[in-house]
Image (spheres, helix red, strand yellow):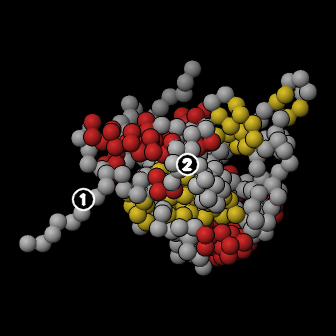
Amino acid sequence: MSAKAPKRDPLAVEFCGLQFATPLVLLSGCVGFGEEYTRVEGFSNRDAGAVCLKGTTGEPRLGNQPHRVFETPQGMLNAIGLQNPGVDRVVDEILPTLDFDETRFIANVSGSTIEEYIRVTERFNDSPIDAIEINISCPNVKEGGVAFGNDPDMSARVVEACRKVTGKPLITKLSPNQTDIAENARRCIEAGTDAFSVINTLMGMAVDAESREAVIGNNQGGLSGPAIKPIALLKVHQVYQVARPHAVPIIGQGGVASAADALEFIIAGASAVGVGTALFYDPLICKSINNGIRGYLQRHGLEHVEQLVGTLQLNVPPGQAACGG
């Protein structure tokens, strides 16, 4: 009599061929290079299915002038400016210190030119990193500073260029600061992306009324946190309509601070869920989110979290919803 196969954990998911212990992903810029929260008692990278490392460029960057971070109602503005030690130091000195038995590690590639994206992607391709996320919200210095991610043509060019130099899973991080995120997703699929992160931060500003000055040193910054969750949910669902026929999975993100938030993203179409800003005030939040998802599955008689992906029931067919007002 053959032995029974071990029962699969209800939270374990497959993402681009990688096995995640849970659907949670610690987001780029929120956990440094995978070590930042390990000094917090009770924290473990094992509570997440994957950790996305800080945005990395070809050469070291000092980042923007202060202030770089500002708390807003139900959110946070940040304009760090991609401060990082450069890809060579990340690959040669930082990656060897990570425990790849602990969780999956995803590199985040950023650049100001397509050539820089290619160089950084090539460097990570020749490393133990599990997957590569490309941040296409960066400004294209050769074309007037327009963000790569706000133009479908430029987005596709970056994805296509990176696809040619890596065989690792390629995740494209989509910007909400564009006209048609679904069209951009379609073009990126054609260019060879394996997955999406949806969404990146929304651009915002904070003003000091007394001094009449912009609070952020860079004038504007990326807004994250619970304030953007409704927008992020909509964008995930819009991208899911395009990605589903091609079996392209999505990491849904934007304001996740509870198990209910994570479940909403999964129901809207995300296969995994990013946790970012919430870590700043509760570094152990992944434990409670995982426990909450398990409880939900038990209450609803579900064996596995993947049964929930894209199960959202719409009140009207896609594309026919009327404007508010």
Is residue 192 at least partly visible in the picture? no
Calculate the distance from the C-alpha at mark 2 to the C-alpha at mark 1.
30 Å
SS for dot 2? loop
What residue is drawn where x is 79% and y is 41%?
A: 220
Kindly identify which numbered label has been placed on residue 41.
2
Residue 208 position within the rendered picture, expressed as x and y whole percent measured from the top left: 84, 28
In this view, which residue lies farthest toward the front? 41
Residue 3, compared with residue 269, is above or below; it is: below
What residue is drawn where x is 77% and y is 57%?
A: 83
What residue is drawn where x is 75% and y is 61%?
A: 84
Three-letter residue code for mark 1: Lys
Compare residues 100 and 72 and report the one nearer the observer. 100
Residue 21 position within the rendered picture, expressed as x and y whole percent measured from the top left: 40, 57
Compare residues 234 and 262 and report the one nearer the observer. 262
In this view, which residue lies farthest toward the bottom? 126
Three-letter residue code for mark 2: Glu
Residue named by callout 1: 7
Kindly identify which numbered label has been placed on residue 315.
none
